[in-house]
Image (spheres, rainbow, N blue to C red):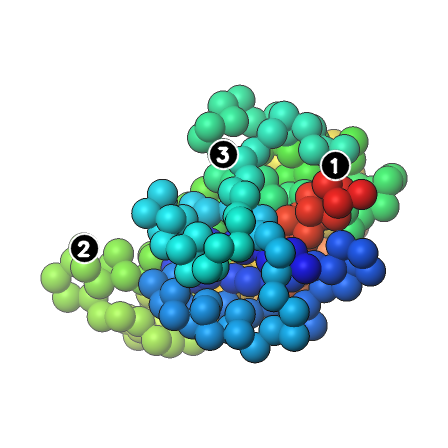
Amino acid sequence: MILLIDSGNSRLKLGWLDPQSGAREPAPVAFDNLDLQALGAWLQTLERQPSRAIGVNVAGAQRGAAIAAALNGCPIEWMRPRNEALGMINAYRNQEQLGADRWAAMLGLRMRLPENHPPALLASFGTATTLDTLSPDNAFAGGLILPGPAMMRGALVHGTANLPLAEGPVTLYPTDTHEAIATGIAAAQAGALVRQWLAGHQRYGEVPEVYVAGGGWTEVQPEIERLLQLVGAGLGAAPAPVFLRAPVLDGLAALAADRAH
């Protein structure tokens, strides 16, 4: 069995792959990235212990070393972006600057799409929000990085004297500070997504499909769906975003399966 590891800035997400049968974990698990004892405890619950691990780590070398130590001798290979993998071309200008999690997530998206697919936009709402596009000919075309919803909220608390840690509904015309902050955050996230969606339509001449992931999705979902409906009506197509549970783990599983065979 092969362990799949997505070490992000805030959370450690885990899955597994049986390379012989292609079976995957019933559902990915996630822990606080500082709680490596939870990783060891979870490993003990598995019916079979992994023989090796494959992962991506964007939380720094020290975190990667701590994860490796918690695996108790199970060898781990940290993946880095490549120019080409599994039929996906990487158009990123400087491979060293591209986060391995973004690359793996796009591989995961690419593996779920048919050969003749429209452009696809993958939005991941985590500590940071990333908005990346896969072209119809399977090129990772690049995308945006901006603070995620929680980071935006925290920046307003720590960077101003009087603004609270907002907990309020999203409304068209907020008349309360909590509502104003919550709506501003959702509007910023939605505006960035729609900007990339329109850019994809302009570049490829067809409406991109939208895929979403990450713990911040539910916070911004209503505003994004509302804006896509409004803008999409003018183009004759308003896509319904498809939620992906763990596109990074999906990409790692595809890499591991390719190597195993």
Gap between marks 3 and 1 measured at Cα:
18 Å
Horizontal side, residue 242 vs residue 29: left or right: right
- Answer yes or no: do the residues labelled 3 and 1 have beta carbons within 8 Å? no
Kindly identify the amino acid type of the residue bearing the numbered disc 2: Gly
Gap between marks 1 and 2 measured at Cα:
43 Å
Residue at far top of view: 93
Q: Is there any visible trace of residue 43 in the rendered image?
A: yes
Name the residue carrying label 1: 86
Which sits in the foreground, 257 or 127? Answer: 257
**x and y, in percent, of residue 69 in the image:** 40, 55
Kindly identify the amino acid type of the residue bearing the numbered disc 1: Leu
Mark 1: which secondary structure? loop
* Label 1: few (<14), some (14–19) or many (≥20) C-alpha neighbours in 10 Å: some
Name the residue carrying label 3: 98
**Comes first in the chain, label 2 or label 3:** 3
Mark 3: which secondary structure? loop
| Residue at 28% in and 61% down | 154
Quadrant position of residue 15: bottom right
**x and y, in percent, of residue 143 in the image:** 55, 37
| Circle 3 or circle 1, nearest the eye | 1
| Residue at 76% in and 54% down | 19
Name the residue carrying label 2: 159
Q: Is there any visible trace of residue 229 in the rendered image?
A: no
Which sits in the foreground, 186 or 68? Answer: 68
Residue at far left of view: 161
Horizontal side, residue 4 vs residue 120: left or right: left
Mark 2: which secondary structure? helix
Kindly identify the amino acid type of the residue bearing the numbered disc 3: Leu
**Comes first in the chain, label 3 or label 1:** 1
Horizontal side, residue 58 vs residue 84: left or right: left
